[in-house]
């Protein structure tokens, strides 16, 4: 648990990228490190003190992430994997702190903070490399009001289990106005089943919502939650139990960024 003094920390707010006073930074190949820190590419990164952050707008830079995460605790390095041809990042990155405690705190206070009007996802990199791939436990949330955003969906449905990626509120491509429905993905069918059972027909922001499994992409009316998906999820879960965790991961590897279509 986070020590009591952590509760007194002010909520982080992005003021704009700048180099922290008294600290030099070097940048190369999508990587920003403290001059006295550890390069994320040298294999010595402390995975337990590293956060994975995703759903990043293309305008988000390494320096901007450094400034945001620095408000939680001392940062050792920031890494945004970039396309070798275009030079643009791929929508996700890694932030390493000096301590595991600060990384844990960052997942609590920075998750779903908005950058360029997009709620970013901040989680422990060790757990989310597998979870962000998803298992098919994707639910549809209908009849939501205009005031319901991704943060409210996350706060509401996060009570039932681990939410994978950032929830999505469908919006009009031209106006950006919400279209009255959204999607939430979980890391297990136990969580999605519980969410559907508890929330279908309940009121959210003054409107009775309908909650069910989302239709599969490019399918002929088939919804998620099928017996086949559940068997695959159970097999994957068993496989994780039988294998030892990988204590290192290569620079640039990670879960896909962006929200995607459930």
Image (cartoon, rainbow, N blue to C red):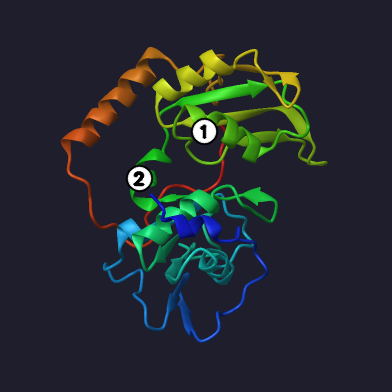
Q: In this orientation, which residue lies closer to the viewer: 197 or 219?
A: 197
Judge depth for marks 1 and 2 and give the one in front: 1
Q: Estimate the x, y position of residue 241 in percent, counting from the top left.
A: 20, 34
For residue 82, side relative to residue 14 (left or right): left
For residue 52, side relative to residue 19 (left or right): left
Mark 1 and mark 2 residues within 8 Å of each other at the beta carbon: no
Q: Estimate the x, y position of residue 189 in percent, counting from the top left.
A: 41, 22
Quarter of the rendering containing residue 15: bottom right
> Label 1 crowding class (10 Å Cα cut-off): few <14, some 14-19, many 20+?
some
Residue 127 - label:
2
Q: Is residue 224 visible?
A: no
Q: Is residue 151 above or below residue 56?
A: above
Quarter of the rendering containing residue 139: top right
Q: In this orientation, which residue lies closer to the viewer: 150 or 101?
A: 101
Q: Estimate the x, y position of residue 124 in percent, counting from the top left.
A: 39, 50
Q: In this orientation, which residue lies closer to the viewer: 16 or 42?
A: 16
Q: Is residue 258 visible?
A: yes
Q: Estimate the x, y position of residue 223 in percent, counting from the top left.
A: 52, 16
Ranked by sequence position, the earlier of labels 1 and 2 is 2
Residue at disc 1, secondary structure: helix
Q: Is residue 84 above or below residue 22?
A: above
Q: Residue tagged by mark 1?
A: 158
Q: Is residue 117 above or below residue 173?
A: below
Which residue is found at the position 46% from the left and 82% from the top?
A: 26
Q: In this orientation, which residue lies closer to the viewer: 254 or 190?
A: 190
Which residue is found at the position 55% from the left and 79% from the top?
A: 20
For residue 8, side relative to residue 207 (left or right): left
């Amino acid at each position: 648990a986070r020590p009591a003094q952590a509760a007194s920390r002010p909520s982080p707010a992005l003021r704009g990228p700048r180099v922290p006073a008294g600290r030099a930074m070097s940048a190369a190949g999508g990587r920003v490190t403290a001059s006295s820190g550890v390069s994320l590419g040298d294999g010595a990164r402390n995975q337990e003190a590293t956060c994975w952050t995703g759903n990043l707008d293309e305008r988000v830079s390494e320096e901007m992430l450094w400034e945001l995460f620095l408000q939680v605790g001392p940062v050792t390095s920031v890494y945004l994997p970039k396309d070798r041809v275009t030079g643009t990042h791929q929508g996700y990155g890694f932030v390493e702190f000096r301590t595991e405690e600060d990384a844990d705190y960052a997942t609590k206070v920075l998750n779903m903070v908005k950058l360029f009007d997009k709620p970013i996802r901040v989680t422990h990199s060790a757990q989310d490399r597998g979870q962000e791939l998803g298992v098919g436990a994707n639910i549809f949330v209908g009849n939501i009001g205009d005031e319901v955003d991704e943060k409210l969906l996350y706060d509401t449905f996060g009570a039932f289990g681990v939410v994978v990626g950032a929830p999505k509120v469908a919006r009009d491509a031209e106006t950006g106005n919400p279209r009255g429905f959204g999607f939430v993905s979980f890391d297990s069918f136990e969580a999605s089943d519980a969410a559907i059972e508890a929330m279908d027909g309940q009121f959210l922001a003054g409107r009775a919502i309908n909650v069910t499994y989302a239709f599969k992409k490019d399918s002929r009316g088939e919804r998620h939650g099928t017996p086949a998906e559940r068997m695959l999820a159970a097999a994957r879960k068993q496989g994780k139990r039988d294998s030892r965790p990988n204590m290192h991961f290569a620079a640039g590897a990670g879960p896909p960024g962006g929200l995607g279509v459930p």
